[in-house]
Image (cartoon, rainbow, N blue to C red):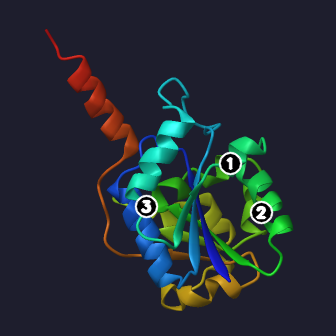
């Protein structure tokens, strides 16, 4: 079984997230994608974070199809960092081939994640193109550090079966939507200038 792990605060979830999920399912030929709604992001401001239940519901409402499983198990198990989540998931699911799925906008800051090298050496990474981040796979610290572990995107379907470190950058349709822009628009609507 092959499973993509797609984590984020999804604050709010939007069609850009759906596009990343659909591309990952198709190009990686995944059996499932676990859309993991996190309790928070240690690198982001939590003042604007909507409630976990609301983010779960909104994610379930837009999740693209039955192979996408929306979950918030990290909150239930006190997991705050991706490295912890990977240890937890892999220990409980022997024989499952996992891939960490993320938008390219996260790649440029990935080296700020706790134990980013450990993450990269634990599970293969699939980086999905996002507007303004297409060149991140060339300039990011993780891309430079693990340049020899890069897999051509034409071989993305074998990525789940590879031993980490292994990663690919997948080009494809991109959505300009972002959660932060949506929050800004909602704030502007609720606080119109007088």
What label sits on residue 63 in the rendered view? 3
- Residue 37: tell me if it is visible: yes
Q: Visible in this render: residue 80?
A: no
In the displayed structure, would residue 92 be above or below residue 16? below
For this view, does 32 lie left or right of residue 66?
Answer: right
Front residue (pair 13, 114) = 13
164 lies above or below 71: below
Kindly indicate the quadrant of the structure image that contains residue 1. Answer: bottom right
Q: Residue at x 37, y 66 (%)?
A: 19
Q: Residues within 10 Å of mark 3 (few under 14, many from 20)?
A: many
Q: Secondary structure at mark 2?
A: helix
Comparing marks 2 and 3, which lies closer to the viewer?
A: 3
Which quarter of the image is occupied by the C terminus?
top left
According to the image, label 2 marks what residue? 89
Q: Which mark is residue 95?
A: none
Front of the two marks 1 and 3: 3
> Are circles 2 and 1 on residues that touch, CB within 8 Å?
no
Query: Residue 36's x, y, as percent?
Result: 59, 55
Question: Which residue is at a point 42% across and 72% down the rendered structure image?
Answer: 22
> Image point 32% across, 65% down: which residue?
174
Which of pointers 2 and 1 indicates the residue nearer the eye? Answer: 2
Tags 1 and 3 touching, CB below 8 Å? no
Q: Secondary structure at mark 1?
A: loop
Q: Horizontal and vertical percent for residue 122?
A: 78, 68
Separation of disc 1 and disc 3 at Cα? 26 Å
Compare residues 73 and 118 and report the one nearer the observer: 73
Tag 1 residue: 113
């Amino acid at each position: 079984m092959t499973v993509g792990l797609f984590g984020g605060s999804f604050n709010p979830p939007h069609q850009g997230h759906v596009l990343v999920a659909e591309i990952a399912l198709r190009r990686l030929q995944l059996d499932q994608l676990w859309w993991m709604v996190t309790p928070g992001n240690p690198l982001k401001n939590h003042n604007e974070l909507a409630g976990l239940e609301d983010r779960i519901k909104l994610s379930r409402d837009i999740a693209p199809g039955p192979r996408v499983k929306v979950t918030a198990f990290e909150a239930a198990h006190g997991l705050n960092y991706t490295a912890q989540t990977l240890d937890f998931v892999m220990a409980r699911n022997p024989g499952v081939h996992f891939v960490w799925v993320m938008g390219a906008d996260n790649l440029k800051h990935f080296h700020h994640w706790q134990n980013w090298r450990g993450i990269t050496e634990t599970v293969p990474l699939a980086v999905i193109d996002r507007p303004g981040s297409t060149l991140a796979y060339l300039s990011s610290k993780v891309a430079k550090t693990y340049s020899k572990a890069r897999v051509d995107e034409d071989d993305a379907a074998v990525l789940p079966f590879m031993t980490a470190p292994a990663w690919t950058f997948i080009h494809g349709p991109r959505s300009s939507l972002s959660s932060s822009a949506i929050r800004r628009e909602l704030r502007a609507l609720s606080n119109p200038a007088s």
